[in-house]
Image (spheres, rainbow, N blue to C red):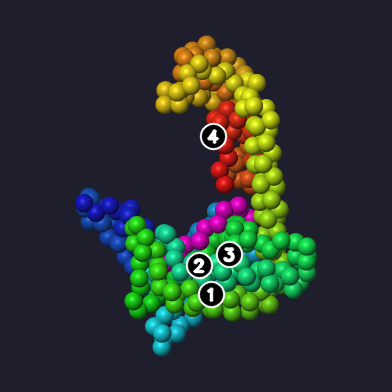
Amino acid sequence: EFDYETLRARFQQMAFLNKGLRLTLTDQRGDEDVVVSYLYEKGLVDYVEYLNRAKKNELVHEEVISFESEAPDRKISLEVAMQWTNGYTESVHTYANTINTHEGGTHEEGFRAALTSLVNKYAREKQILKEKDENLTGDDVREGLTAVVSIKLAEPQFEGQTKTKLGNTEAKAFVQRVAGKELADWFDRKPTEVREIIRKAIQASQARMAARKAREQTRRKGLLEGGGMPGKLKDCSSRDPVKSEIFIVEGDSAGGSAIQGRNPETQAILPLRGKILNVEKARLDRALGNNEVQAMITAFGAGIGE
């Protein structure tokens, strides 16, 4: 049986990827027809605005950057739309012949390479980055970025476990060349906006280095303290991770009740002070510096991922 929501989402996605094309979905299975129609005159620009619709007050720059290029002799074309927000995660969506390439591929590699290179070049030329400063990484540059990259080519080669990774080598060179040229032009025309973009990337870089230090300190602290547990943790006696579980409760009073009702052999209780930091809206360095987060890291004993 057809799933309406799956079809609706795909119709909307296709309308975003093919500007000016109206797509109408009609579901006649119920007592009344359900009809939804999509038409996006600005295509990928509308797509990025849609993705950022809940972040209107968090935009680094108002204008959605967009460009497109075609090489008819090579049977390849590219469309890109992008906008930075003050968020901490990147949201880059790539497509090849309107197929969502979840695993990325050569077109995404070309886009990333052009973007990282250009931002560093511009930051050096304008002396925003000093000679002693490290280059910004791709992750620094793309923090908070929402982008849609759509490429169309005659003979796409899909790789990966789910065949959603583009493998055409010519795609990387084409995207890197076009994106580098078009973004350089936008950077020259919008110096104020570019400075804000670079400022955000530098903040991301500083946070990344601070997070690295925090990781090292947390690991070193664990080694120096011999793996000691947080003071308020009521550990269980079992050392078998398959049988053991840990309950995180808010406050000492809840912790006391949980301790009384637990099985001390397999159930550990860790009371935390109030509501902890919302780590989804905080950079890693701030999260790792939070006492309650540190208590959880120590209690779990699983270390910190990269």
Give the number of the mark in front: 1 or 3. Answer: 1
Which amino acid does the dot numbered 2 rest on? Glu
Disc nearer the start of the sequence (1/3): 3
| Main secondary structure type of the part rendered in magenta | strand
User: Is there CB contact under 8 Å for labels 1 and 2?
Assistant: yes
Q: Residues within 10 Å of mark 2 (few under 14, many from 20)?
A: some
Q: Which residue is mark 2?
A: 109
Give the number of the mark in front: 4 or 2. Answer: 4
Q: Which residue is mark 1?
A: 176
* Residue appearing at x 58%, y 76% in the figure: 180
Q: Secondary structure at mark 1?
A: helix
* Residue appearing at x 41%, y 59% in the figure: 102
Asked which quadrant contains residue 255, the reply is: top right
Q: Which residue is mark 3?
A: 83
Which amino acid does the dot numbered 3 rest on? Gln
* Residue appearing at x 67%, y 27% in the figure: 225
**Is residue 43 found left or right of 303 in the rendered image?**
left
Q: Residues within 10 Å of mark 4 (few under 14, many from 20)?
A: few
Q: Is residue 3 above or below residue 126?
A: above
Q: Position of residue 99 (x, y in %)?
A: 36, 66
Q: Position of residue 217 (x, y in %)?
A: 69, 39
Identify the disc placed on residue 302.
4
**Is residue 75 found left or right of 295 in the rendered image?**
left
Disc nearer the start of the sequence (3/4): 3
Disc nearer the start of the sequence (1/2): 2
- The magenta-colored residue range is 81-95
Asked which quadrant contains residue 296, the reply is: top right
